[in-house]
Amino acid sequence: MGPLGANAAARSGSLTVGLCSGFVGSGCGVGGACFGAGYGSIMSIDSSLQRLQKALDDGHSEKAVSALAAAATDLSKEPRALLPILEGLDRQKKDELLATVVAKAQELNLLPLETAIFELRMKFRAGQHRDALRLVDKALALSNDHVEALRTGGRIGNLTRDEGIALRYWERLARTSLVEPEASLQAARIHLRRQQYTQALNWAQMAVDRRPDSLEPVQIAVTAGIEVGWPDGCDAILAALFKMDRASGLKALGRLAQELDAERASRLLSLLQEQFAGDQGIGEIASKSFSEWVVNALEQELASRELEAAASYRAARKVQPANSNPQRALDRLCAPSLLAMREAFNSRDFAGAVEHGEMAARINPECFEAWQTVGRAQFTRGNVSEAGEAFRRCTELDPKDAHSWLTFGLVLNQGGDRRAALRAFQTARGLADNDVKREAEASIAALHPVLVREAQQGATDGNIEQAWQASEAALAIRRDDGGMTQLRRNLLRQQQAQIRETWNSGGDNIVGLCRSYLEKAPGDLYVSTVLGRTLMRQRAYGEALPVWESVCKQSPQDAHGFLQIARCCRSLKLKEKGLAAADTALRLDRNLGEAVELADFFKGQSASPAEGSITTGQLPPQPVEVREIRTTAQNRRAPG
């Protein structure tokens, strides 16, 4: 049957069924007349395409043009029926015949985007790069982010050694396609050659994210990172380089240990020591750095530059935590500030206590006493935010200290963060002895009426989020609070009504409202359906897919949910999942003609579509709201 066979049978006997908002309507409404007209049109297209195919098989380009012209009226209604013929000529690289058919199709205004892509491929194969670039821009004018057009433009830039052209298309492609593995690497290479290291690092990091097992983007990222001062996030990339190319990793590490400041170098060395325990090369660099930092710290200490000395001691402690000498040195440097802090606090000079305590914490950020005293002094002075930060550090340094959690909770409550205060009190209660435990329980009990008032006030003001969060915290204290339980039911009804009203009026914030509701009531079928339909309208198929999968888990007998999954998979090029969804939709409802077409589409795909092939996912998707689907006559007559 040639390239037409698979599609011809599915088209024969089709009729048109309206589709609104992604759901199938009830029927044609005009009975046999509609069926007869549709059947005749399909048969006319098939016979015309068969004549065209025969002329092409015989190599008669003039007859092929005549056959295409004769079928123009019918093809204008279903132009994509011509694609199998064009793709067959393209695969066989019969460019002379392909050019003839493409030119006639363009003259008839059939498939303007697809014919531009076929013409682009022919020009590229022929090495006519100037004409190919013109067609790249033509295709992009028709489909702004067409992957194949952008990729071809980048490759032409590479072949012609025009880095400006290459960057224009590679960077645009990398931003457009979140899974494109080549574009970001190409951009990183060009920027590295140009010694534009910041840009090279950014694109190389993107390439690493997309191809974490590829060596070249890691090498580019490390090289560029060294040149721009080793920004945050580069440490993990160097660790990746060690796994792939240890020799290069050691060379880069040796340079960084000399060029970075002591504390940044120590963090990097500590990370690598942890990930590559026992590596001799890393150990030698760490040992050498330790000795240099200790010597430097002693020199700074003798010159009375305590903060500079402390930085080197902290770095030494980081790479050799079992060595007690750096810690003793830090204690020695901290001692004067701690003594002054204690004296100031005891004499109620809270400003002085803060000053000396902060100095001690700058010398040794792990000094628990300094942070605790600063927190108490700041709280006494009424500086709630600063006190909260100090007590937060205490809970990080000693997570099992119940007093720190209790005090942290009191500060948070004073600052109005009731939910965080509750979590701190609950932690203190779980860690404490009897005295602190009683105080934590009393603080929790005192929070309940405050949270109830906040929940009620939020509901009165229409602030659903505030009311929900406050009621959640109140119920964490008293699970049997019926008033809060009822308030939450009312909040859900209120928000669902808001979603329904926004959906009916076409409001812009419907996605945010739906996501907010589903955080409160996961799996709600109505809201999930509204969210899925909205995302389909926005062509956000990657976001819509998990929504429809959730709908189908809750309603496994609803064929339309599986049809939506198949639609998403078509645009996302997920063959196996899409085919399974289309088959399930057909099993549940044999009258879903679009499911037949989707199943045929997936069966016609290879597991990994060949690069350059024109697929539905590369073309502008048809709007779900106004798409028309076909139901085969056989399915229409089937019982049930």
Image (tube, rainbow, N blue to C red):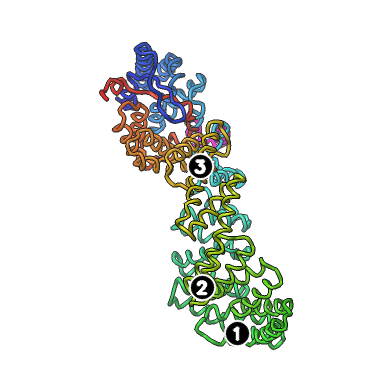
Magenta span: predominant SS is: helix
Q: Which residue is mark 1?
A: 294
Q: Residue 148: give x, y in percent of width and height.
A: 49, 39
Q: CA gap, disc 1 to disc 2?
A: 48 Å
Nearest to N terminus: mark 3 or mark 2: 2
Q: Residue 497: give x, y in percent of width and height.
A: 52, 37
Mark 3: few/some/many CA within 10 Å (<14, 14-19, 20+): many
Q: Is residue 207 magenta?
A: no
The part of the chain drawn in magenta is 119-138
Camera sees residue 125: no
* Mark 1 or mark 2, whichever is nearer to me: 2
Camera sees residue 12: yes
Q: Which residue is mark 3?
A: 514
Circle 1: residue type: Val
Mark 1: few/some/many CA within 10 Å (<14, 14-19, 20+): many
Q: Which residue lies at the image location 74% right of the left edge and 80% below the top edge?
A: 349
Q: Is 622 rendered above or below residue 419?
A: above
Residue placed most toward the observer, 393 or 303: 393
Residue placed most toward the observer, 27 or 278: 27
Q: Which residue is mark 2?
A: 438
Q: CA gap, disc 1 to disc 3?
A: 58 Å
* Mark 1 or mark 3, whichever is nearer to me: 3
Q: Residue 292: give x, y in percent of width and height.
A: 60, 82
Circle 3: residue type: Cys
Q: Identify the element where label 3 is drawn.
A: helix
Q: Residue 501: give x, y in percent of width and height.
A: 54, 34
Q: Is 488 rendered above or below residue 302?
A: above
Circle 2: residue type: Arg
Q: Identify the element where label 2 is drawn.
A: helix
